[in-house]
Image (cartoon, rainbow, N blue to C red):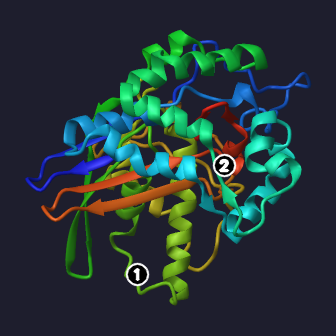
Amino acid sequence: MLIRLANGKTTFLDYREVAPGKATRDMYIGKDGKLDEEASVIGYKSIAVPGTVAGLTLALKTYGSMKLADVLAPAIRLAENGFPISKRLADEFERQRPALQRFGVSRRIFLNDGKMFQPGDTLRQPELAATLKRIARNGAAEFYSGETAHAIVDDMSRLGGLITLDDLAKYQPRVREVLRAKYDSDGHSWQVLTSPPPSSGGVAVIEALNMLQSVPLKGWDDVESVHMVAEVMRRVFADRAAYLADPDYSNVPVAGLTDPCYAKEVFATVDSQRASSSKVIKAGNPHTCGVAASAATSSETLVSLGEGPHTTHFSVVDAAGNAVASTLHTQRQLWFARHFDGWLSPE
């Protein structure tokens, strides 16, 4: 969550999920030595330690003006009384049926015990309402050390998950410094405020804007403009896949990736008349101006740019000029399958 107050002060709240203490590097590698792509997105072993409850309550406590119980009241009401299912949601349940029906609770709640919801039906989640009520009374501590925490760990221990009470108790959101950049185009100048690692989007946006500084973009109806943006994004995503990680555990070359000199070097590989292939685009060697790129840091990573409907974002500006931009990332819509008695993990 990126916050910019009316007085110009900025901060970034990082409440991404973290790996459980029992997680290992090869936990999603199958017996054949290959990646089990399903294991990291479906089932109890795929669940990380959630950070949303801690992060949002920290934001409310630090910058909010309402009480937690009042903030949660609408969500509690919707969970308890239910809401009408749209055609889009009914279709989503049908698409995710193979995964949802593998778990008793998700089958009961989201597949209506196999009867399948139709548009206009009401979806009620009384267990979720009860959990939200406990959080409203007891704060984030309820989720990380209270009754809810014990319920989570009980499910984990019975069904092959990795999260422990110690994992939950140790979780803490991080306060990080906002990334800043400048973008000039067609006589206009903008100051860019964006997210730092472990979020990868902020670094990617700055790197892309640095490369596009000298490109006269005319709009999405202009073939040349679209071509240049696409070619830039191929290279940005190659760097993103190779270098972006959690700065608490990895050395992320943010300064190099966001440096204009490096952007010029990468942009020089773009052919203005011919499309390149994402299958062969490799990450570059990020460095700052005046520092030569090191061959030793070269990454040979090849990347796939496949994306899906994983992210929810909202931006809000209040009457006083305080602004918030918040993003929640989910690993596929199969987070529906990670529903337990009284809690739902979108991490």
What x and y, as percent, mark residue 179? 28, 47
Reading the image, the residue beneath label 2 is 303
Reading the image, the residue beneath label 1 is 217
What x and y, as percent, mark residue 329? 53, 47
Q: Residue at x 66, y 68 (%)?
A: 86
**Quarter of the image holding residue 52?**
top left
| Nearest to the observer: residue 154 or residue 117 | 117
**Secondary structure of the residue carrying numbered label 1:** loop
Give above or below for 56 relative to 187: above
| Nearest to the observer: residue 299 or residue 208 | 208
Task: Using the rendered image of the protein, determine whether residue 294 is visible from the camera's viewpoint.
Answer: no
What x and y, as percent, mark residue 323? 23, 57
- Image side of residue 246 versus residue 256, left or right: right
Q: Where is the C terminus found, in terms of image quarters?
A: top right
> Which residue is outermost to the left?
7
| Nearest to the observer: residue 286 or residue 40 | 40
**Quarter of the image holding residue 174?**
top left
User: Circle 1: is it few (<14), some (14-19), or many (20+) Cα within 10 Å?
Assistant: some
> Which residue is outermost to the top?
166
Task: Using the rendered image of the protein, determine whether residue 197 is visible from the camera's viewpoint.
Answer: yes
Q: Which residue is drawn at 74% across and 63% down?
A: 90
